[in-house]
Image (cartoon, rainbow, N blue to C red):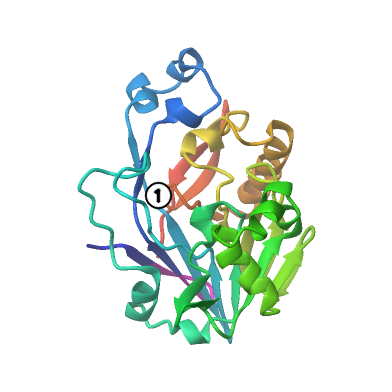
Amino acid sequence: MINTRQFPLGQATITVINTGDLQLRMADWLKVSPEVWAQHYSIDLYNEPLRLPTQCIHIKINRASILVDANVYDISPDDSYAIPNYQPPPDLIASLIASGIRPEDITQVIITHAHFDHYNGTTIERDGICVPKFPNALYYLGRADWENPDTQHALNDSGSLQYRTLRVLQERGVLELVEGDRDLIESVKIIAAPGESPGHQIVRVHSDDQTLYCVGDLYHHPAEAEHPTWHANWADAESILASRNALTARALAENAILIATHVPSIGQLRANESGVAWVEAKLV
């Protein structure tokens, strides 16, 4: 099973790892009516289960070894996201090693936002104790996600995922809370992009006049890039539209490549009469 793609971006090497597919129906989560959807796309695409990846992205540039999101596939067979009889691919650690990336060499882990499938692979249990999975890395999370009342409540619940991951990172002194934009290294920048969650952030990589954005869940499907007012029913409409409009302007100006966690294709935006289209990027 092929679950890893790798390509150069200037002096950087980008590795995209799918840790496991999920299924979901747009009708269950996308805040747009079927009548409006059908004006643009097949209604079957709206009603039928879609198979979507969960992608983590590794950036190797100079001495930096940066991971964007860290997921472990732990979907139970009776979960609504589970695909019947699905066998997940090799896990994140195995895929990193197979790509020549040593987990102990990772210098930074950027958590795009505090939804479970973006950070549940940041720690691992050893001898009954949860410890950072990438022992030499600093971890970056949007402060607004950390300060979200739901997160704060979960951080005090020893049975919660947040307690076993984010709290562990914080107590070990390796979690940095990000407010606004942050230059990580010369070629990599964290950019605030709230809406999917209060502290949602994306990552810009720029090398040799080539630009990539790791956009997390700013989009779950290309239709959201093409219709930026369409969004998940849990998102904040005003802030996610502002974040998308800001990215669209940058991506068009820079002819940037886009990777979204749950979009199978690596894309680019192309201006058209109605706004933009998501097209598959031509990678070297």
Whether residue 71 appears in this view of the structure is: yes
Name, please, the residue furthest toward the top: 35
Predominant SS along the magenta part: strand
Closer to us: 257 or 66 = 66
Rendered location of residue 155, percent (x, y): 66, 59
Q: Is residue 44 above or below residue 224?
A: above
Q: Which residues are magenta?
A: 6-14
> Which residue does the numbered mark 1 point to in the structure image?
265
Q: Quadrant of the N terminus?
A: bottom left
Q: Is residue 115 above or below residue 34?
A: below
Q: Secondary structure at mark 1?
A: loop
Q: How many marks?
A: 1
Specify few, some or many for label 1: CA neighbours under 10 Å numbering under 14, 14-19, or 20 or more.
Answer: some
Rendered location of residue 35, percent (x, y): 47, 12
Could you tell me the amino acid type at mark 1?
Answer: Ser
Q: Is residue 72 left or right of residue 166?
A: left
Closer to us: 281 or 97 = 97
Q: Is residue 220 above or below residue 88?
A: above
Whether residue 208 appears in this view of the structure is: no
